[in-house]
Image: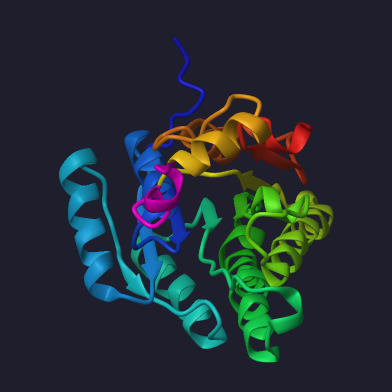
Amino acid sequence: MKNYFDLKGHVAIVTGCSGGLGVQMAKALANQGCNIVPIARRMEKLEEVAAELREAYGVEVLPIRCDVTNTEMCDDVVRQTMEHFGRIDILINNAGTGAVAPAEDITDEQFDNEMQIDLFGTFKMARAVAKQAMIPAKYGRIINIASMYGMVGNKVAPCSPYHAAKGGVVNLSRGLAAEWGKYGITVNTICPGYFWTPLTKDMLETEWFANYAKSTIPVERYGNEGELDTATLFLASPASAYVNGIALPVDGGYTCV
């Protein structure tokens, strides 16, 4: 029996891997035997994640502190990973932020910060991984995490910089997919909807959100922990070689209505 998601011996860099969806996706990859390079700004959190991954899945884990807005740090993550493992098969660009305020009150600094982390940081990591590892290897899987808000607007939480940055991530992925496909590199986007994480649970577990979900999300609920796993594994798999440049909503149908 063939395991289409077998990633034994592969190496994945996961940004924003100190909690939430980043850790969930790292666990999904590790469950398939993939070695993990978790990166984020808080080293103490990364060490906790690394210990959990090693103990639960028996894979090799190399935590590296990195601010994705810093070009030198992004390049150094790739250098250290290549020195340690000799390969990088998968990059998941998950690091992000979100400024919530009416558009007319958003400051230049808030807008710039959103672009620097969500959009430019995604590009910096993709550029470093492609140049140092994937193009020479003629193989790679880059998965950029955008949002359903990169595809549509919203009337609940005003966050125009987030919409702009995540929409940029969607089309950046298409641009990179078009350029790097000839090297055996696929670049795709996952656009999550409302997902349960320790940071979102206080909003999602309210009566207000339950009512909102019933009126706006066809499956009438938020996404549970683990329901992003198979989308991640699908796009990370060697078997998805002919899937390139897509934006995959995992949103319970929010963007289909």
The answer to whether any part of residue 222 appears in the image is no
In which quadrant will I find the C terminus?
top right
Rendered residue at 34%/65% (across/down): 84
Rendered residue at 17%/55% (across/down): 51
In which quadrant will I find the N terminus?
top left
Q: Is residue 239 left or right of residue 230?
A: right
Chief SS of the magenta region? loop
Per the rendered image, the range of residues in magenta is 197-206
Pick the front one: 73 or 117: 117
Indicate the position of residue 93 as horizontal and vertical percent values.
55, 60
Indicate the position of residue 91 as horizontal and vertical percent values.
53, 56
Rendered residue at 49%/57% (across/down): 88
Q: Is residue 92 above or below residue 33?
A: below
Among the 4 quarters of the image, the one containing residue 172: bottom right
Q: Is residue 70 above or below residue 4?
A: below
Indicate the position of residue 147 as horizontal and vertical percent values.
64, 52
Q: Is residue 100 left or right of residue 175?
A: left
The answer to whether any part of residue 157 appears in the image is yes
Pick the front one: 26 or 80: 26
Q: Is residue 58 left or right of residue 94?
A: left
Colour scheme shown = rainbow
Rendered residue at 45%/39% (across/down): 207
Indicate the position of residue 66 as horizontal and vertical percent values.
42, 77
Among the 4 quarters of the image, the one containing residue 114: bottom right
Q: Is residue 26 above or below residue 227?
A: below
